[in-house]
Image (cartoon, rainbow, N blue to C red):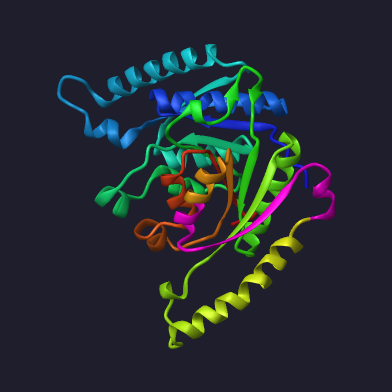
Amino acid sequence: MRVEFNRILCATDLSDFSNGAARYGAAIAKLFDADLSLCNVVDVPTVHLQDSGMVTSVELLQNLHAYAEEQLEMVRSSLAHPAEILVEEGLPAETLARLVREKRVDLLITATHGRSGVQRLFLGSVTERLIRGISCPMMIITPPGEDAVGISTKGLEIRKILVGCDFSPDSGRALDYGFSLAQEFQAELHLVHVIEPFAYRESFLPTNIMAQVQEKLEPEMIEKLTERIPEEVENWCEVKTTLLTGRPHRELKRYSEKEKIDLIVLGVRGRSLVESLMIGSTTDRVIRQVSCPVLSVSQPGS
């Protein structure tokens, strides 16, 4: 499978960090000769909450729309690739999901600032909802921002790609993207599987027995990882297979920092609404902790 990005949508909330992520979108669009759209969504419910007797909601929407167009024009003028400007009104997650469908977007790029506490637990984030609301891959640019995402005067530079593999169909598609992007960038590819300790699971077995079972599983896991690598991949990149033990999001963070990973690719597994809002997924937790971009890949039709 060879990845092709023909239509890229880059969403921004007009913050400096989010606008900086647009440079990443432009770099990818230039590399793949893709159509690029820059989009800002005016959050209509927020506008209504800010309504006052002196400024009506209609006037406020018009002012915000004009401001968004002006700011997006400034962002576009700084990019090394042509882009169209879109200013939409509505709920951000739902509006972006609609645009992805209508424009047949191949890649959505957005930035996340992270949320925590009660707001995160009960509301979720736009990013979390989008990950499970769109069918195309989604690139999330995380702090510390554009200086850490491999953009230089030579263009986009991705030297090391990490693919998280849990042997599910979700991670299988993530592997396809990982292999293809490794070929595109001539990057080193790291296939990583994280074994969660039995301490995190309910079990009636004694600790020493569980440790023995885990020890016997490890060679089998390495073999399974190796089996996932097509023979032709070795023609264009070096592949490293690694087993880690611990909580997946923590171990992937540690590994990405240690190996100086430039891009993490993760498959997205479907969850119930309550699970995704109250607990969060491994992908969501990784996004909130790592400092390199994360590409989330869902199964078609999921």
Q: Is residue 253 above or below residue 54?
A: below
Task: Name which residue lies at 67% across and 71% down.
Answer: 219
- Residue 92 in sight from this viewpoint: yes
Task: Name which residue lies at 59% across and 20% down.
Answer: 83
Instruction: Measuring from the top left, give residue 282's x and y in whole percent.
Output: 47, 56
Q: In which quarter of the image is residue 203?
A: bottom left
- Residue 132 in sight from this viewpoint: no
Instruction: Measuring from the top left, give residue 161's x and y in whole percent.
Output: 63, 43
Which range of residues does the magenta coloring cover?
Answer: 230-252
In the rendered picture of this protein, how many numbered marks are placed on residues? 0
Instruction: Measuring from the top left, give residue 214's x and y in whole percent.
Output: 56, 76
Residue 74 painted magenta? no
Q: In this view, does 157 lie above or below 302?
A: above
Residue 233 painted magenta? yes
In this rendered view, identify the residue nearer to me: 119 or 193. Answer: 193
In the drawing, does residue 152 fall left or right of residue 11?
right
Q: Residue furthest left?
A: 53
Q: In which quarter of the image is residue 104?
A: top right
In this rendered view, identify the residue nearer to me: 119 or 101. Answer: 119
In this rendered view, identify the residue nearer to me: 118 or 157. Answer: 157
Instruction: Measuring from the top left, give residue 193's x and y in whole percent.
Output: 59, 61
In this rendered view, identify the residue nearer to me: 62 or 137. Answer: 137
The quadrant the C terminus occupies is: bottom right
